[in-house]
Image (cartoon, rainbow, N blue to C red):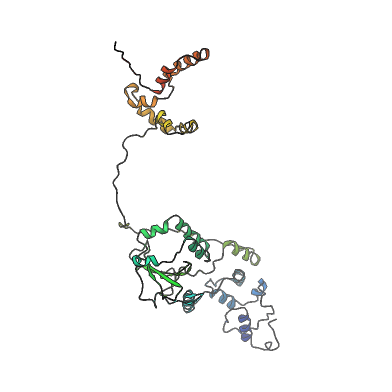
Amino acid sequence: MYTTPECINMEADEYEKIFMFLNDEPYVEGRKARLSIEMSENDTSIDTFKRWTVPVLQQYLRIRGLRTSGKKEELVALVYSINLMKIKQVLTPAEERKLKADQYCDKLKTPKGIVPDPLIDLTSGWITESKGVSMWPPTMYYDIATFLQKKEDKSLSDRLMKDYKEGKAYSYFTSGWLKEVCYHHIDNNSLYCFLKAECTASQRLNDVPHTTCVLLEKVSGEIQTAYCTCFAGYVKKYAVTMPTQGSKPSLGKLSDALLPACQNAAVFQYIHHNYTHYEPSEDFNVLSTETVTTTEGTILPLSLPETAGNCRDHNELLEKLKYTDADREKILQETLGQNENIEWFNQRKGRITCSRMHSVFAKSETLKKNNAVNTESLVSEILGYKKKIVISLH
């Protein structure tokens, strides 16, 4: 219980100080009415917040960067929902700078001690890429995946690994967005080393390049930490790989939290339109150019003998003998003129056309009666074999 013999006779504002302290909330000056609150420290029921005054409710919302207008019932419902979702207070600029500085210093801590700051302490001793590439640690795909999996933002990790597997990461390098990668061994006794490079934003070519650094273990290639001086990270020297993200309640959680407190509550979700803005540029770092000539005329399907010559067996041939309407239209247009058209003869090879149908039918009926009948002449005609003329000289 909060009410103890020592605090029963306290002034109302002092009582409220104790109450707000135990609930990790700021004290509101000028509060003189006694708060008759008796509850445990973990009691966060809706009735608890109903006993709060409007100034206290507004201060609770204000320090979290939320609106403070509305009736008391609305404020109570909103505070109750926020408390359930554990939304943290918004840091002041000074607190945010201190937090970023502390987090940056934490990134310089390793299991073997603290490494120098690559942006301040290591101003010299960097080895260029051409000379230092042989000294780089054996960092592999597994090390990159392991490092990214430690991050809280799984969607970002998945996207980065997908970009890496699809070769986009290498394209960033070949496109010139990533400049020369320099190496620093720190010192001969250090188990770690730094890789540093400047990186240009693809959509802000005129901006000052960012500086990216990666701390690696020399022998294993394991990634210890990484950070960048980009605006998306921390300002100035307190730059890391990712910006700090506040707690963002989901639509479902917010609705579930509001429902018990306010049956008529309605939650709307904003639709964010993400547009990619490209700046015009003519320089795409083209390595080489090659002049090619497009094919002139219509490309027809191969003739049956040509198709059969590219097949391993009859099953593959039957699979390739499927023509689309577009293929049939091409053959029709390119074989006009019949016997005056060379392509007409080529496309007829191997096909039993209407003009040959009677001959094929008659020959098949003859074969039923006498299978010794010679069919070489008809087969040669269908397959388009040229007749050989033999001249005997006596």
Q: Is residue 41 left or right of residue 142?
A: right
Indicate the quadrant where residue 180 lies. bottom left
Tell whether 16 sits left or right of 189: right
Report the number of discs: 0
Q: Position of residue 161 (x, y in %)?
A: 48, 59
Q: Residue furthest front?
A: 394
Q: Residue furthest top?
A: 394
The image shows residue 388 at horizontal and vertical percentages of 34, 18
Above/below status of 250 relative to 393: below
Q: Quadrant of the C terminus?
A: top left
Q: Is residue 12 above or below residue 355?
A: below
Q: Is residue 205 above or below residue 15?
A: above
Q: Against 132, is 336 above or below?
A: above
Q: Which residue is at 57% across, 80% downward?
A: 26
**Residue 208 at x, y percent in the picture:** 34, 68
Residue found 49% across the figure and 13% down from its top: 366
Residue drawn at x 46%, y 62% as measured from the top left: 140
Considering depth in this image, is 40 or 300 the residue closer to the camera? 300
In this view, the residue in front, 129 or 147, is 129
Rendered location of residue 186, percent (x, y): 41, 75
Which residue is more in the foreground, 267 or 25?
25
Quadrant into which the N terminus falls? bottom right
